[in-house]
Amino acid sequence: GAVVSQHPSRVICKSGTSVKIECRSLDFQATTMFWYRQFPKQSLMLMATSNEGSKATYEQGVEKDKFLINHASLTLSTLTVTSAHPEDSSFYICSASQDRANSPLHFGNGTRLTVT
Amino acid sequence: AQTVTQSQPEMSVQEAETVTLSCTYDTSESDYYLFWYKQPPSRQMILVIRQEAYKQQNATENRFSVNFQKAAKSFSLKISDSQLGDAAMYFCAYRSGGGSEKLVFGKGTKLTVNP
C-alpha cells in the first residue's frame, strides 16, 4: 500500500532556532500534501495544503512566515518551523493523496516537536 | 464550510462485544467521501474504513462496518467482536469530491476496550 514517511519522529530544539520536518511519499507521486497539527487529546487541525511547484495554501490563523512549506518535488514536502517558541511545541503530521478521486489520505507517523 | 461532529468524547466496550461510534456531518455538496481513522497511542493515523457518498451500500471491512444515512448526514461506525487492540481514538473525517481535497476531522472518540 501507499507509504508516507515523515522525519524526524521526535525533535527537541531551543527557542529561536528553526526546525525542518520532511514528508515523503515513498511509492507514489503526490501533487498535494497536507500538514496538520495536533494538540494533546485534540483532533487534527489542518495548517496548510502543500502544492507541488506552487505556493502553499495556509488555513486561517496559521502564520505562513513562521511555518514555511516547500513542495519541491512530487514526493517531498517540507515544513520548517522558524524561530521556534515553546508554544510551537506540538505533534505535526503530514499526509498525502494519490490524487485519485476515491483515494484516501495516507499519513506519516508524525513529528513530536518540543521547544525548550 | 463542511463540519464533522462526533458527539461521544469517550466510549467503552467489553471485549467481544459490539460498539457503535456516532458521526454526523454538514455539507451542501453531493460528491464527497467519508472516512473513519483510528489513532492508537503511537499516534499513527490508520484508515479503518471509507464510504463514497454516491454508494448506497454500507462499507464493510471485516469487523468494521458503517451505517451511512445520506439524507440524515450520519455516518456511524460499528465495531463487532471488539478486541483489546481496537482501543484508540477514532476520528470521523469528510473529504470533498476530487483527488486533492483536504480532510475535515471530527473531534474524535476515545474508545476503551475492557477485558
Image (cartoon, rainbow, N blue to C red):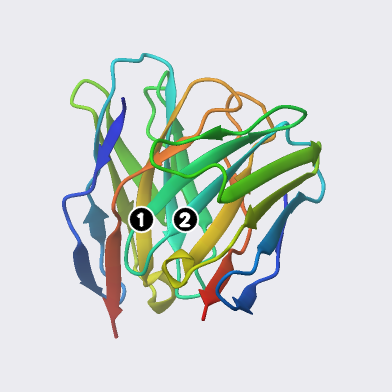
Q: Which residue is nearer to you in this view: A56 or B30?
A: A56
Residue type, label 2: Arg
Identify the residue under disc 1.
A43
**Residue displayed at 45% across by 72% down:** A86
> Residue B9 placed where, x, y %?
20, 61
- Specify the quadrant of the image occupied by residue B10: bottom left
> Residue B25 placed where, x, y %?
26, 33
Q: Do the CB atoms of the residues marked 1 and 2 lie less than 8 Å apart?
A: no
> Looking at the picture, does residue B56 appear above or below residue B19?
above
Q: Which mark is residue A37?
A: 2
- B104 relative position to B24: left or right: right
> Looking at the picture, does residue B97 appear above or below residue A64?
above
> Looking at the picture, does residue B90 appear above or below residue A97?
below
- Specify the quadrant of the image occupied by residue A105: top right
Q: Label 1's element?
A: loop
Q: Badge 2: few (under 14), some or many (20 or more) residues near its Cα, within 10 Å?
A: many
> Residue B16 placed where, x, y %?
31, 73
**Residue displayed at 52% across by 58% down:** B45
Q: Which mark is residue A72?
A: none
Say whether residue A64 is visible.
yes
